Image: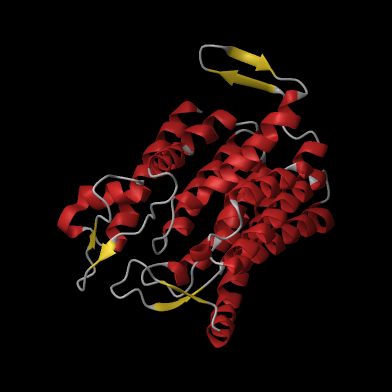
Amino acid sequence: MEYVLLISVLVSFVLAVSFLPMWIRVCRKVGLVWEDMNKFGHPKNVVSSGGAVVVMAFVLGVLSYLALKTFLFGGQVKALEIFALLAVILILGIAGLVDDLLGWKNGGLPMRIRLLLAAAASVPLVVINAGTHFMSLPFLGVIDFGILYPLILVPLAVVGVSTTYNFLAGFNGLEAGQGILILSFLSFVSYATGSAWLAIVGLCMVGALAGFWIFNKFPAKVFPGDVMTYGIGALIAGMAILGNFEKIAFVIFIPYILEVALKVRGKLKVSSFGIPDKNGILKMPEDKVYGLEHLAIKVLGKSATEKKIVYLIHAFQILFILIGFLMM
């Protein structure tokens, strides 16, 4: 009977699909549009920060789950953990929206401010002492981090994952598709390890992202903005902490670690975009590779369309998901 709780996932999907057309109309009317950098001529016709609708749909979906669990099924509800996780995502969502409004071409929020806000956003998980203090590390075995886990490791996880998830971005459907793949698998891991409540929370975001993807896939009508990427990153970190599967989450996040390393190679100044021609083929913007997006362009060569680049990155992500599955 508790499969009825999956209605909350449908709630998130329906809300996203219902409200995004309204968001697109209003943003076009007031001029909140961004350039589509991977299209020839860089047309300025794609609505910004649609991730705000995704966050809203996700939060309301999770609240509907809590309502169903409380009034229909009764029993224990992980309300404290859920509200702490929602607080983290909402704080980072607000920070991301401010960053979007300041404009990525203007640099957005200064890096140190982003890091401070992400650290502040981790406080709800810190104060509830989320997760367990024991971690199994390669070659070292099981280590008890004690008080260092909530005070140091939890903030580091939230800051690291939330602020780097948007590094692998800038292509139609990429961020949403990656979020669907990663959070679907982490929801499966949550269910398989006895945290069904956490699985439903993760799937609520998957539902919202699926609704968003319909409007964000090639050719995109709306971009996610940092309001969505920060929120997804925060949810990935939060699920890993609350579900106690940090090692699996780390493996899943390896493509983003590689992306950060390549971006650092370019001193965080080289963009991820390609150079589009009239036929929709993207060429390398630099001689060297400064991101997985550039690597995909190099691998695909003369057939490097935006859609193929996104699918190739998704395939690369699925490879690490399979590795994570084998680790269970």
Could you tell whether 299 is left or right of 36 in the image? Answer: left
Q: Position of residue 173 (x, y in %)?
A: 42, 62
Q: Is residue 207 above or below residue 234?
A: below
**Left or right relative to 254: residue 312:** left
Describe the colour scheme in one phrase: secondary structure
Asked whether 3 or 26 is in front, the reply is 26
Q: In this rendering, is residue 28 above or below 301? A: below
Residue situated in front as seen by the camera: 203 or 317? 317
Q: How many marks?
A: 0
Identify the residue at horizontal 56%, vertical 81% (top origin).
Answer: 27
Quadrant housing residue 63: bottom right
| Residue 226 visible at all | yes
**Displayed quadrant of residue 241:** top right
Residue under the point 62% across and 33% down: 193
* Residue 19 point in image, percent of width and height: 61, 76
* Residue shown at the point (58%, 65%) measured from the top left: 100
Instruction: Please state which of residues 92 and 24 is positioned toward the viewer in this rendering.
Output: 92
Q: Residue furthest left?
A: 302
Residue 36 is situated, as x and y percent measured from the top left of the image, at: 39, 71
Q: Residue 163: where, in percent of width, then height?
A: 57, 47
Residue visible at 36% across and 69% down? 218
Whether residue 132 is visible: no
Q: Residue furthest top?
A: 140
